[in-house]
Structure formats: C-alpha cells, structure tokens
Image (cartoon, rainbow, N blue to C red):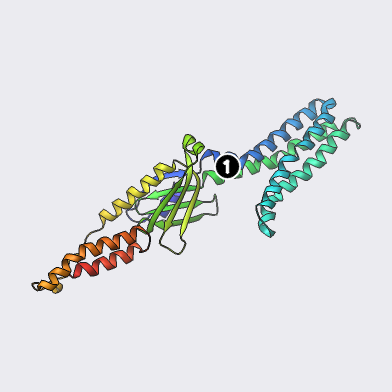
Amino acid sequence: MGYIKKLMGQGETVVFLTRQHWIGLLNRIFSSVFTFLVFLAVGVVAGLVPTASPVLGFIVLATLALPLYDIVVAVLSGSRGRELIGRIWVSVLIVLFILGLGIALISSAFVPGTNAIVGAIFLLIAVVPLAQAIKIFLDWYNEQYIITNYRVMSVKGVINKHVSDSALEKVNDVVLAQSAIGRMMGYGNVEIITGSDIGANLFYRIAHPVRFKTEMLNQKGELVRRKPERPAPVAEVAAPATAEEQSAAQDIPALIQELDDLRQKGLLTEEEFQAKKAELLKRL
C-alpha cells in the first residue's frame, strides 16, 4: 500500500481494493510451474537412477507439447513482430532445451557416467521456468484495482509502474459480466464507460466484481451528495416574475429532468449537465 498512498490526493482514501482472481493467475502461471516441476523431477531421477534415463528422455520429449501449444496460441491470436517475439521467446528457449536434454538423456544410457552431468544440467535449467513463475506471481500480486472516494484506479507493475484512473463523476455506466462458473467462484469482468476520450476500461476476471461495482456506484452517489450547492449572487436576485416568466419557470423542472435522462443515457457528460442545469436554475 506504500506506493498507493503516494497516489492519494488531499482527503482521498482507499475504499475498496481487489486483484485479478486466482483463476487468472493459475491460467498464466500453470505452464511455467509445470515445466519447472518436470525439469526438477527429471534432474533428480536422472542423477540417481541411470537406467531410467532413456525412458525419461522420451517423457521429456513428450513435454514439447506444452511450449509448442503456447507458441501456436500466440501466433493464432494475431500477434506479429516484436509483440510475437515477446510472447514466445521463453517458449522457444524451452523447446530447444527440451530437445537437447531429451536427446542427451537417451544418449546417456550408452555413455557411462554422463547421467549425473545430465541430471545436474536439468536442475540448472529448472531455474528458468521457476524465475518466470515468480515474475508472473509478482506481476499478478501488484496488479491492483482500486476504488477511492474520488476515483477508480488500476495500478500495474512491480518496479515500473503503470497507473490509470477515472474520476467517479465521469463514470457514465458500469457493465458487469459473469459466467455461471464466475458466479460460483467469485470472479467476473467489469467494464467502466466514462465520458472521457479514453472511453472505457475493462478489468478482466477480477475478484469480487459485484462488490466492486456496488462500491463504485455508492462512492459516486456520495460524491454527488458531498458537492456544495452554489448560492445565487445577490446581484442576480430577480424582480417579481411576470405571468409569462412564471409559466416558463414551471417548465424548468421538466427540462432539468429531460437533461438528467440524457446524462443517464451517456449523451451528456456530468459537466455539461451541471452547466445546463445551472443556466435553467438562474431563470427561476
């Protein structure tokens, strides 16, 4: 919370904080953890049981399916150029390691004394997916979605931080999407539609999405109630109204209601609504 406290303005406090659900973490980290466990197990067995090396070699080669799957998914998702390289370079390295070490395991059965070296190499290589898994976990832990009494924020990054926020008064609509499994396990997607040029923010598979939406709407309502009403200047106090002015004044509440309907539909921003409302109130 230390970094988040630095982002708070005067009188601003954190009301609710959540992260992506652990299902999202599992989806991102499974490949790295599984690869680490495979390398660890193979390294230990290869070093202690030489006769098992050929069998382990074929098992290791079978695990090529996992990194190859990650590469195929990245290509089919439409990634190209640097983005594609950034997504698959770890998987490509894993493929090369698996090929080399699988062949080394099979051949070690025919070269006495090499099984201990091959086992040590496997244990050393296991550090790579382990480090990747730790990085994924830290990225997930530091990806936070926050509601304060003034705005909604997303904070990402371990060392290099990326912060985006929207003022609660600019939030026009909130869309919550939950599948049946999401309702049972407590996760869902929350899309925040604002009146700014950015348009919308999508928070994917966050934990406690219903509470997140409810708290945001509650804080927006509190923010509107906290705004002080501006008193009319003395110089603008009107003389007794004529019959015509009184008739026009009676229509003003209806006009304000129509403007409020347009604001609720997202056709007017909060600032535009307040400005037009002030103009109409001056006619009273």
Percent of width and height locating residue 84: 68, 55
Q: Where, quadrant-wise, is the C terminus in this rendering?
A: bottom left
Near mark 1 (Cα within 10 A), the count class, few <14, some 14-19 or many ≥20, is some
Percent of width and height locating residue 9: 36, 56
Q: Is residue 235 left or right of residue 66?
A: left
Count the numbered circles shown: 1
User: Which of 5 and 257 lies nearest the eye of the viewer?
Assistant: 257
Asked if residue 284 shows in the view, the reply is no
Secondary structure beneath dot 1 equals helix
User: Which of 277 and 96 lies nearest the eye of the viewer?
Assistant: 277
Percent of width and height locating residue 228: 23, 59
Picture residue at 53% right of the left edge, 38% below the top: 22
Q: Amino acid at mark 1?
A: Phe
Residue at the extreme left: 240
Q: Is residue 18 depicted above or below 283 in this figure? A: above
Picture residue at 78% right of the left edge, 43% below the top: 97
Asked if residue 77 shows in the view, the reply is yes
Q: Is residue 247 left or right of residue 65?
A: left
Residue at the extreme right: 110
Percent of width and height locating residue 19: 48, 44
Kindly identify which residue carries mark 1.
Answer: 137
Q: Is residue 246 left or right of residue 16?
A: left
Asked which quadrant contains residue 43, the reply is top right
Asked which quadrant contains residue 169, the reply is bottom left
Asked which quadrant contains residue 232, the reply is bottom left
Picture residue at 54% right of the left edge, 51% below the top: 157
User: Which of 44 and 22 lies nearest the eye of the viewer?
Assistant: 22
